[in-house]
């Protein structure tokens, strides 16, 4: 394939008036990312986005664990679309890659097999009395940030540049399998020319690292992580990616999918504790960011407001390279600003006390 | 006779995922499960398209259909536009409907998935919630996760004002009306019946294996047991 063939894989992304669907995984592990996404859209960019209290999980993790049947998930998704229409919106944006994959798959299924859409409409009406419209525009929340990347660059307080060397930060991006492997033309750049995160990194001053296993799965594998007996699959696949990217000395990893963000963070902890292997520089881990966190840092948000204290791998080495001012002693404070104790020290989570020591004395 | 193949054809994923496989093996080459397990999606697709009842029944009772991680890496690379992972999804669904899943170690894990994810959806409206990712069952989640769970209200409270409460925001409680709709959807679409089928066949198998039914002990057995014969 020629390099120019990536231009086939572009998509229309709505500019305003979004119906927002939260993610099970992102709200559990990265609630600050969901909060800052809404803040960036509404406060920084002046866009209208609706955070509906009525929607549920799309049940995608259950579907890909093969316990939620196809007919069931189709009807749950139809309910989400009905809620969107009832709220007066046409542009659906999902915070989850698994969900985004589900939405693209089911919209295609309804197109290819119209009888399934018909049956879903009947099921939804029978179960809830609701009726739905197909969204005019479907995007993942990273598509929305990608769409507004130059507006964010224009408001940037910081760049993805190492302030000590003046060089662009070296960034590994991971778009997640279900963003574009199911329907490549529904994702920016498709699965072969991943550009949704790369476009943000380039616009904000960083440099993308291309490495052999760039398109390999993070290793979630649904049942292969969710069942304890199978987790070797999951860590082995993350290991394969980490081994492949490490020689390129990335300054951080940015992920599209909340699951991938979590796995590439947590499996670094596991590999460090089990084997003593770390993949970052100076014996540290490689910080793993969501794209909301990356955008938030660029826009000048405080890292603890972004929720980066919830990462297992310390993010301070990256913050120091970027010249982010932060209060090390505020990392482990609770809701009321009181110290709530810190996590037990681990190989990839040990620098904050040293940082406190260095800053205090 | 192609009884099982006809049953598989009722699933639109099989019709979408398998037209005419030429057995090139690209799916196996890119497959993360094939990199880890003794697993070959090419061979599974090959067996299914023989339409041979005996061979498909063996597949439905096998370990091999449970290795796939449903990452869909096979889908964009297939030169014939097939999706072996869709074929797997159809096989897994049929295996559970017919009760064949309990005949393999990996298949029996469906009970754990039904209880951990499926029941949580019906309880909370979400596939997962912080307190069902228990640190003792998830040591790989690390020390920070344990700190989060030990201080969940203090930590989540910084990012959402509705942790466990109704309203807009992360980790909000789904209202009773919302949950009633979700339950009704599961009833109307066969989701609840599917859950019951998993429970019933698991209970039968658990007794066959000497457990007092599909109790907590059996759950832990299927959740943790790895015979290490999968590689």
Image (spheres, helix red, strand yellow):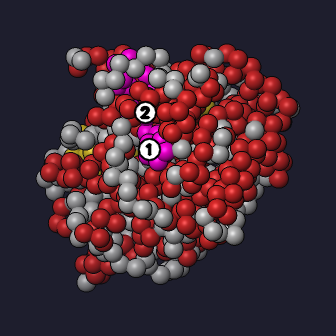
Q: Nearer the viewer, residue B192 or A156?
A: B192
Q: Chain of mark 2?
A: B
Identify the residue shown where x is 63% and y is 68%: B210
* Residue A54 visible in the current orientation: no
Which of the 4 quarters of the picture holds residue B46? top left
Q: Position of residue A153 (x, y in %)?
A: 36, 38
- Per the image, the residue denoted by label 2 is B44
- Give neighbour class at mark 2: few <14, some 14-19, many 20+ (Cα, 10 Å): some
Q: Main secondary structure of the magenta part?
A: loop
Which of the 4 quarters of the picture holds residue A136? top right
Quadrant for the N terminus of chain B in the image: top right
Say whether marks 2 and 1 touch (CB < 8 Å): yes
Name the side, left or right, on which A250 lies relative to A129. Answer: left
Q: Chain of mark 1?
A: B
* Residue B72 visible in the current orientation: yes
- Per the image, the residue denoted by label 1 is B64
Identify the residue shown where x is 56% and y is 51%: B103
Q: Is-magenta flag for residue B161?
A: no
Magenta stretch, residue numbers: B62-83
Identify the residue shown where x is 42% and y is 62%: B227
Q: Earlier in the sequence, mark 2 or mark 1?
A: 2
């Amino acid at each position: 394939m020629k390099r120019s063939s990536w231009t086939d894989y572009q998509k229309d992304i709505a500019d305003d008036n979004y119906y927002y669907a939260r993610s099970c995984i992102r709200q559990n592990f990265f609630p600050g990312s969901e909060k800052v996404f809404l803040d960036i859209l509404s406060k920084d960019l002046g866009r209208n986005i609706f955070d509906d209290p009525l929607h549920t999980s799309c049940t995608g993790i259950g579907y890909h664990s093969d316990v939620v049947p196809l007919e069931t998930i189709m009807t749950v998704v139809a309910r989400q679309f009905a809620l969107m229409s009832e709220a007066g919106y046409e542009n659906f944006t999902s915070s989850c890659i698994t969900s985004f994959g589900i939405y693209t798959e089911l919209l295609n299924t309804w197109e290819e097999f119209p009888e399934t859409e018909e049956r879903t409409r009947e099921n939804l009406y029978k179960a809830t009395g609701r009726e739905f419209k197909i969204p005019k525009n479907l995007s993942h929340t990273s598509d929305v940030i990608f769409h507004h990347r130059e507006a964010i660059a224009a408001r940037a307080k910081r760049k993805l540049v190492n302030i000590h060397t003046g060089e662009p930060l070296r960034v590994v991006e991971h778009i997640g399998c279900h963003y574009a492997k199911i329907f490549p033309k529904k994702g920016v750049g498709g699965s072969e020319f991943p550009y949704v995160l790369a476009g943000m990194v380039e616009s904000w001053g960083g440099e993308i690292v291309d490495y052999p296993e760039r398109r390999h799965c993070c290793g979630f594998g649904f049942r292969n992580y969710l069942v304890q007996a199978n987790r070797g699959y999951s860590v082995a696949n993350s290991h394969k990616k980490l081994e492949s990217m490490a020689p390129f000395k990335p300054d951080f990893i940015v992920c599209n999918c909340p699951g991938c963000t979590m796995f590439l963070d947590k499996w670094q902890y596991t590999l460090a504790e089990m084997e003593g292997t770390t993949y970052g520089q100076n014996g540290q881990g490689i910080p793993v960011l969501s794209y909301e966190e990356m955008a938030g840092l660029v826009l000048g948000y405080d890292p603890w407001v972004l929720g980066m204290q919830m990462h297992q791998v310390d993010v301070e080495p990256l913050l120091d390279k970027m010249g982010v001012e932060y209060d090390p002693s505020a990392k482990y404070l609770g809701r009321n600003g009181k110290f709530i104790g810190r996590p037990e020290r681990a190989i990839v989570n040990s620098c904050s006390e040293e940082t406190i020591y260095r800053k205090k004395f | 006779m192609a009884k099982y193949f006809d049953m598989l054809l009722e699933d639109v994923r099989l019709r979408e995922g398998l037209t005419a496989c030429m057995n090139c093996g690209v799916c196996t080459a890119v497959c993360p499960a094939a990199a880890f397990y003794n697993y070959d999606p090419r061979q599974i697709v090959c067996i299914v398209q023989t339409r041979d009842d005996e061979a498909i029944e063996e597949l439905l009772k096998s370990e091999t259909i449970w290795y796939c991680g449903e990452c869909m890496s096979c889908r964009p690379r297939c030169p014939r536009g097939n999706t072996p992972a869709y074929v797997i999804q159809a096989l897994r669904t049929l295996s559970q409907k017919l009760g064949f899943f309990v005949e393999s170690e990996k298949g029996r894990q469906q009970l754990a998935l039904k209880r951990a994810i499926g029941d949580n959806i019906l309880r909370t409206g979400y596939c997962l919630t912080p307190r069902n990712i228990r640190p003792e069952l998830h040591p790989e989640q690390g020390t920070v996760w344990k700190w989060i769970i030990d201080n969940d209200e203090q930590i989540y409270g910084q990012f959402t004002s509705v942790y466990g409460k109704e309203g807009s925001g992360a980790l909000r409680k789904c209202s009773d009306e919302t949950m009633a709709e979700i339950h009704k959807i599961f009833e109307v679409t066969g989701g609840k019946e599917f859950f019951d089928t998993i429970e019933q066949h698991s209970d039968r198998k658990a007794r066959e294996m000497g457990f007092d039914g599909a109790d907590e002990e059996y759950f832990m057995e299927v959740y943790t047991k790895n015979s290490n014969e999968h590689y």
